Amino acid sequence: MNLVDVLNPPTSELTKEQIADFQHKMPKLGRALGSYLDDLILRNKGEIFEENVFNELTTTYFRDLLFNGKVDRSDVDRYVSFERHMALNWVRRFSDVVDWDDTDTST
């Protein structure tokens, strides 16, 4: 949604400062959402797709490590990457799923 200027690599969770910056950009509780929603713009579709594919492949990598008993040699935070995989599948309506709770992350 372009609520953060830079999408950090999935090597660690967000810092307190990054979370505070994001929260500052969110609408205040109890306020009308009209102007907030009117000003939202999705990131470039290509950027969304590339990020989604990267995180899907990362999920596959970690799944394969788990099933094969191999050691992780990457610096990717598996939790961060998986959450991005799920969120981007939901944004893209992967497999026509609209409900967050039904979002598919199988690879």
Image: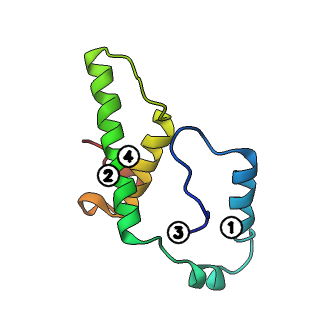
At 51% from the left and 43% from the top, the residue drawn is 10
| Snapshot quadrant of residue 38 | bottom right
| Snapshot quadrant of residue 23 | bottom right
Task: Say the numbered circle drawn on residue 26.
Answer: 1
Of circles 1 and 2, which is in front? 2
- Across and down, in percent, residue 72 comes to 40, 22
Of circles 4 and 1, which is in front? 4
Query: Label 4 neighbourhood size at 10 Å, few (<14), some (14-19), many (20+)?
Result: many
- Across and down, in percent, residue 102 comes to 34, 51
**Going from the N terminus, do you reach mark 4 or mark 1 first?**
1
- Across and down, in percent, residue 7 comes to 55, 56
Amino acid type at image mark 3: Met
**Where is mark 2, residue-wise?**
53
Cα separation between marks 2 and 3 = 18 Å
Vertical comparison of 39 with 96: above or below: below
Task: Say the numbered circle drawn on residue 1.
Answer: 3
Query: Label 1 neighbourhood size at 10 Å, few (<14), some (14-19), many (20+)?
Result: few
At 73% from the left and 59% from the top, the residue drawn is 21
